[in-house]
Image (cartoon, rainbow, N blue to C red):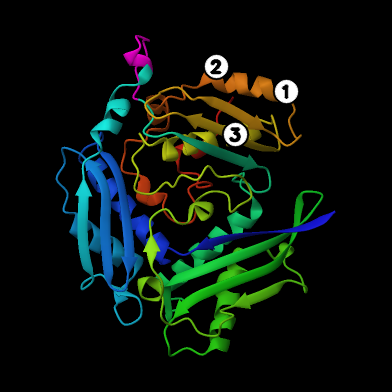
Amino acid sequence: MRKLFTSESVTEGHPDKLCDYISDSILDSYLAKDQNARVACETVAGKGEIFITGEITSIAEVDIEKVVRKAIQEIGYDNSNLDMDYKTCKITISLSKQSPDIALGVNKSLESKEGEKLDSEGAGDQGIMFGFACDETKELMPLPISLAHKLAKKLSEVRKNGIIDYLRPDGKVQVTVEYEEDKPIRIDTIVISTQHQERVDLETLKEDIKEKVIEEVVPQKLLDEETKYFINPTGRFVIGGPLGDSGLTGRKIIVDTYGGYARHGGGAFSGKDATKVDRSAAYMARFLAKNIVANGYAKKCEIQISYAIGVAKPVSIYVDTFGTNTIPEEEIVKKVENRFDLTPRGIINYLDLRKPIYTKTTNYGHFGKKYLTWEKIIQL
């Protein structure tokens, strides 16, 4: 049986990703000075304005406006007529401290209050987190999202390196993979929409994108005469970024995870410190799923971990190997429970999550990057 599956990625200049990057830049700035900072920072971008809101509790002093302008500059936004100018955009900051009601549960877990000897904070919120891995790629990620991220990243690289010097920061990518018996066999469709300066004609742009982006990234063996290419199918993409569309932190959670190939619990990552299990437990779930596959216990694995606010230990752990397991799923769950401390503090310590590492995660997926601690492979 043959079927098609599509995943999407976006460039770092996409308005939502710009907001994610600003939020993670603020988070990293606090963690660099105070590893125990509590940060839940949201960014809104649109029409020459940036609005920062949320809650930050920290002993550190950070020049947030300076951090925001530097982040926008790093993305490449310097033209208010086409997208946004980091030098002149309006920045409004409206932040408060973490709610004392939430802090009660985070500072001391329910288990500790009830007399259990448990050295961990409580979860910063209730929630369900999913992790996933499969053997389709060397990084144990689904092929559609893996290729979409690589193409989106290449778009930014050729822009920043002057290889295609008329590109602007905003862009989106879609990759459709054809599967046969659950194995990827070819690329059916590639869609790329990239912001550009007005001076370039569409045919030149199409040729450059195909030659300098697609052919540099996608393995030739996956392309054939039937592969379809849609490059800037509207014909024009000059106005972009926050001028063309508004941006908001946390609105690209499917791009951030598995491209829709696996389930998602709904919680966003960017701008949140590791006491928020939306982020830390999702990273740990990916680590566990990846190592279940890497250790040969399954070819495909999805794991769910759930938490209650103020409670340290997970409410539940669920493993689904889609019939590809080599040992019983119950045994896999036991291996996880016996080996790992899945309290917020246990995860933070194991994955070393109090460091200012988060701007490295913001773009082109939070998973599949070998330098991240939750991507390491161990003997399970």
- Provide residue 282's location: percent of width, then percent of height: 49, 38
Seen at 26% across and 56% down, the residue is: 52
Q: Does residue 166 appear anywhere in the picture?
A: yes
Identify the element where label 1 is drawn: loop
The residue labelled by disc 3 is 303
**Magenta stretch in the rendered image:** 111-121
> Residue 328: which numbered mark, if any?
1
How far apart marks 2 and 3 lie (CA) works out to 16 Å
The residue labelled by disc 2 is 338
Q: Quadrant of residue 203?
A: bottom right
Which quadrant would the C terminus be assigned to in this image? top right
Seen at 40% across and 70% down, the residue is: 160
Outermost residue toward the front? 101
Q: Which residue is nearer to you in this view: 166 or 12?
A: 12
How far apart marks 2 and 1 lie (CA) works out to 16 Å
Identify the element where label 3 is drawn: strand
Q: Does residue 161 appear anywhere in the picture?
A: no
Q: Quadrant of residue 60?
A: top left
- Provide residue 14's location: percent of width, then percent of height: 43, 66
Seen at 73% across and 24% down, the residue is: 327
> Residue 288: which numbered mark, if any?
none
Within 10 Å of disc 2 (Cα), the crowding (few <14, some 14-19, many 20+) is few
Say whether residue 316 is left or right of residue 2: left
User: Which is nearer the N-term, disc 2 or disc 3?
Assistant: 3
Point out the frontmost of discs 2 and 3.
Answer: 3
- Provide residue 265's location: percent of width, then percent of height: 53, 42
Tag count in the figure? 3
Residue 131, above or below 87: above
User: Which is nearer the N-term, disc 3 or disc 1?
Assistant: 3
Seen at 40% across and 28% down, the residue is: 344
